[in-house]
Amino acid sequence: MLLLNLLNVQTVLVALTVGLLVYVIRRRFIYRLPPGPWAIPLIGNFEVYTKPLVHRLILQLSEKYGPVIRFSFGPITTVFLNNYEVVMEALVKRKADFAGRPASVTFSLISEGYKNIALASYSPMWQYHRRVAMKALRNYLQGDLLEKLTQDNMTKVMNMMAAEAEKGPIELKSHLDNIVFYQLFTLCFGENKEIGDPDVEFLLREKDNVNEAIGNGLREDLLPFLKDVYPSKRYIIIKEAADRVFSFLNRLLQKHQETFDPNNIRDLCDHLLLARSEAEKSGDDESLEKLNDTYLVQTLSDIFFAGVDTTRLTLEWFLCFISGLPEIQAKCQAEIDKTIGRRCPSIADRQALSYTEACLYETMRAGVIAGLGVPHLTICDTQVGGYDIPKDTVVLINHFALHRDTKYWKDPEKFDPLRFLDENGKMDPTKLDSWLPFSAGRRHSDERPYLVVCVVLPVFSLLFPSIVSDPLTSDVVKMRLRRTASCVLAVLTGLVFCPSRANGIGCFVCTSLNRGNQGCEDTFNNTGEFYRSDCQASRDGRIGMFPATQCIKMVAEDTDAGFSLIVRDCVVDNGGTTSETEIGRQSHCGWMKVIKYNGRRMSGCILSCGQDGCNTANRTLQTFTFVLTIAFMITKALI
C-alpha cells in the first residue's frame, strides 16, 4: 500500500514536471515573445519593482531591448510599451485585444467585484455601462451648468484659502482636492455642499486611507488565498474603507430613488436612474439587470473618484514648473490680460489664448502623473511591434517614455510650451503625436474634460507674473524631474506661496532646493535684480503658503503704463519700520513689494490693488470662466 502511494506521488510529480516543460517549450518556440532581462525562475523580475522611478528604469531598458519589453513577476507575464508606434498599434489598431483588465484582489475590493467601468474587463456588459455613463454625461453637461458649478466651487475655495492664509502657513493639498471634489459631488448628487461639509470630508478621508494603504499593491494580489486565511493590515484597511464608502453612496442612491422625478432631472445620479426607469418601462429585463444598485453606485464612484488625485498632482506640477519659469508665467498672464481684460471670457477666447493652452499641454507632457497608467490585459492571442503577445498578458503603457521620446520631442526634459504651437503662435494639432497623458483606444479615459477644467481654472488665481528674476532655472527643474517620480509630492518642497494684508491671496515668492530656513530672504544687487535663497515651504517640506511682510498703508497709482502699487510706510510683523520703495509696474493687478528691515530686504506679493484697483475675486472668476472655454470645447469633442 505504501509503495502504491509513493508511485502515485511520483506519477503526479512527473506529470507536473512534464506539463511545466511543455508549457515553457510551447511559449518559447511557438510564440515570438518580446525580449527582456533575465528572470529568476519562479520569482521573475521582482527586483524591478524594488527600484525607485520604475518608469525611468523601463525607459532606460528600452534602449537595450527595444520599445516592447517583457518581464515576469512570479507567474505573471508583463509587457511594457515604450513608444508611440507600438502604443497606437495596441490601443487603436488592435484595441479590442488589449481592452481587458487584470484580475487582482485590490481591484476587486475597490470595485465590488469589477462592477465599475475603470477596472472591469472588456465585455458586452462593460460596453453597455460605458455607453449609459457617457449618455448621462452628455445630457447633464449641456448648457452652462458646468460653468456655474465650477465658478461657485472655485469662489468658495479661494475665499477659504484667503481666510486661512491670514493666520499663517497653509498646506495646499486639501484645497486642491476641494477644487475638484466638491464640484464632482454637486455634479453627481446635486447637493451644493459648503467647504468642510462632513459628508464630503468623510469621502475625502476614506479616499486618502485607501490610496495610502494600496501603496505598491497588496501581498494578496500575488497570493489571493491569504485574504481568507491571513489578511494583511492594509487589506483590512482597504476593505473596511471601501465598505464604508459604498454604503454611504448606496444611501445617497436610495435617497435619490425615493424622490426621483423623470420630469425633473437634478444630477448625474438622476440621469442613471432615468436610464433604469426607461429600461423598466420598455420591459428590457436584460438592461434592467445591468442597472442594479451595485452597478449604478460603481458608475457614480468612477465619475466621482477617478480624477481627484490626478487632477491635484497635475495642478502641483503646473505650480512647480511655472514658479521656476517666471518669463513663461508672465507670457500667460499677458495673453489673458490682452484677450480678456476685465470682462468675462467666452468660448471664442480660446482661439486667442494658444500660449496658455500650450502651457497646460506641456505640463501634462513634462509632468506625467501616472507614469505607467492602469494596466491592460490581452483578451486573446495578439501581436504588437512584431512580437507575439499571448492571451492574459498584462500590458503597461509607459506614458513617461512617450513624453520623453526624442523622435517627437526636442530636448524633452525642457519645459517648452512653444513645441505645441505653429509659426503663427496657434495650437498645432499635428504636434500632438506621442502626447498621450489620457491613454487611447477602448480604454481612453473619460475624465479628460474634468481634468482639464480643474487643472486650468485655479492656475491663474494662485500664480501671477513676478517682476523679479528667479534663480530656479530650467536646469534645476530638470534635475528635480530626474530625481522625483511623477507621482511623488517631494518635487514641490521648494514652492512657497504667501498671503498679504491686501484683499487677496499671495503669489509665488521663492523657490529653492535649500531647506535651511522657513522664511525667504532676498539679496539685492547693483543691477536691480533679486535673487532668492534659503526658502522652503514648511518644516516638513510640504507645499504651503507663508505670510508676506505686511503693509499698513499702500498708495494705488493708475498710469498709461499699467496699474501699480507704491509701497509706503510699511512695517514688518515685529513693528520695524522700512524705507519707501517702488520696484516696478505691472500691466496686471499684481505687484511685488520690497521693504528693507535691519539691512535685509524682504519681499511679498500683492495680488489685489488698493483703492480704484481691480478686485482679486473678480479676476478669479474671469480667469475661471476662460478656462471653462477649453473644457467645453474638449468636452464637446469627446462626447
Image (cartoon, rainbow, N blue to C red):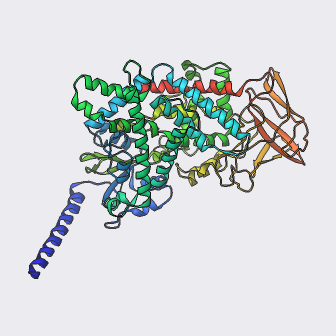
For the residue pair 444 and 281, the one nearer the viewer reads as: 281
Q: Where is residue 466? Give x, y as percent.
A: 73, 36
Left or right, 144 with reference to 533: left
Tell me the quarter of the image containing the N terminus. bottom left
Quarter of the rendering containing residue 162: top right
The image position of residue 36, as x and y in percent, is: 36, 58
181 versus 338 height, above or below:
below
Residue drawn at (67%, 24%) of the image:
618
- Using the image, determine if residue 261 lies above or below residue 502: above
**Occupied quadrant, residue 324:** top right
Residue 453 lies left or right of residue 264; in this view the side is right
Q: Is residue 369 left or right of residue 612?
A: left
Image location (x, y in percent) of residue 251? 41, 37
Residue 36 in view in this figure: no
Q: Is residue 15 positioned above or below 247 on the image?
A: below
What residue do we see at 44% from left, 49% from top? 241
Q: Residue furthest bottom?
A: 2
The vertical placement of 456 against 494, above or below, is above
